[in-house]
């Protein structure tokens, strides 16, 4: 890893680590479509999983998405990857209290992934920190660690389809967050973290997933700057 990459890794980890204590509570305000956004992601993430699935959570943060999946698949074993140690510590506490088996990996998403294989790979509001080449590379690597027919669910912050719409979506996002109770301090902290964002459009990412070898690629939910992107590792059994 270059010195520049190390510096970016450390800065990103520090920014998100500092927010660990309030991140889950604020997410319900800063993701105005929280219920449908996460609800759609959870529906796909839990689809057709075996009784004791192996799940990889990329950019797991406080473990919110993993905890949701565990609510439906309590015998699952989770591997959580994140740059921020304080975030992972909160995730570990939550999952331990619920009796959910888990492993923690403090690392950047550009680093080699745990080898798996995994029945599902999930991610929420994390992959947009990579640049476009990094996203494409990660999608290929995710495909490689999934079992045949395994699902990849990326609940993501995305760019608007044009610069004008992207600016409009950002304006509406702030207005919606304020309507839900977000204040100047919370929004300023969110925008400081957003300095690390490199979102891409839905259409571009669906294409990258197909290029990476995923099948049945779909965006089942999109609302302004939030979208759920889904694809499956190829399986002859899936196409009947």
Image (cartoon, grey):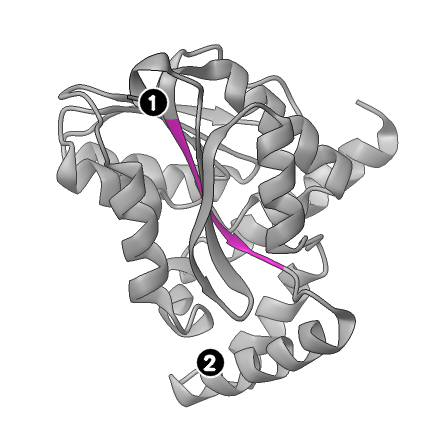
Near-viewer residue (101 or 227): 227
Query: Mark 1 vs mark 2: which is more N-terminal?
Result: 2
Residue 57 image offset from top left, x and y in percent: 41, 33
What residue lies at 52% left-to-right and 21% top-to-bottom?
A: 143
Tell which of 195 and 186 is nearer to you: 195
Q: Which element type, helix, strand or loop, lies under badge 2?
A: helix
- Up the image or down, 194 lies above or below 203; here it is below
Residue 177 circle label: 2
Above-or-below relation of 21 to 178:
above
**156 is within the stretch colored magenta:** yes
Q: Quadrant of the C terminus?
A: top left
Residue 21, quarter of picture: bottom left
Q: Write down the region rendered in magenta.
A: 151-158
Taking the view exactly as shown, the residue that stands out farthest to the right is 3
Tell us which disc is closer to us: 1 or 2.
1
Q: Residue furthest front?
A: 240
Can residue 104 be seen in the rendering of this structure?
yes
The x, y position of residue 172, in whole percent, is 56, 83
Q: Is residue 103 left or right of residue 143?
A: left
From the viewer's perspective, is residue 197 above or below residue 212?
A: below
Residue 173, position as x, y percentages in the image: 54, 78
Residue 143 numbered tag:
none
Name the residue located 32 percent from the left edge and 34 percent from the top edge. Answer: 92
Q: Magenta-highlighted stretch: main secondary structure?
A: strand
In the image, residue 111 lies in the stretch drawn in magenta: no
Tell me the quadrant of the picture where the N terminus can be found.
top right
Disc 1 + disc 2, Cβ < 8 Å: no
Q: What kind of element bears circle 1?
A: loop
> Which image quadrant for residue 151?
top left
Report the side of 137 relative to 151 (left or right).
Answer: right
Q: What mark, if any, has residue 239 been given in the picture?
A: 1
């Amino acid at each position: 890893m270059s010195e520049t990459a190390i510096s970016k890794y450390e800065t990103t980890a520090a920014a998100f680590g500092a927010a660990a204590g309030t991140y889950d509570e604020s997410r319900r305000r800063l993701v105005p479509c929280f219920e449908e956004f996460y609800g759609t992601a959870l529906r796909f993430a839990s689809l057709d999983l075996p009784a004791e699935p192996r799940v990889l959570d990329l950019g797991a943060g406080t473990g919110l998405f993993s905890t949701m999946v565990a609510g439906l698949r309590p015998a699952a074993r989770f591997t959580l990857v994140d740059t921020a140690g304080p975030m992972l510590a909160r995730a570990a506490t939550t999952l331990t209290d619920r009796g959910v088996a888990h492993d923690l990996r403090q690392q950047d998403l550009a680093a080699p992934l745990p080898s798996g294989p995994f029945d599902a790979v999930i991610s929420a509001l994390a992959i947009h920190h990579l640049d476009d080449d990094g996203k494409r590379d990660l999608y290929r690597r995710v495909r490689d660690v999934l079992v045949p027919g395994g699902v990849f669910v990326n609940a993501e912050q995305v760019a608007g389809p044009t610069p004008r719409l992207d600016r409009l979506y950002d304006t509406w996002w702030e207005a919606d967050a304020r309507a839900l109770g977000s204040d100047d301090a919370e929004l300023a902290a969110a925008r400081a973290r957003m300095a690390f964002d490199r979102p891409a459009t839905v259409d571009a990412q669906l294409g990258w997933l197909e290029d990476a070898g995923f099948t049945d690629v779909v965006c089942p939910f999109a609302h302004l700057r939030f979208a759920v992107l889904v694809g499956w590792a190829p399986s002859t059994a899936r196409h009947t």
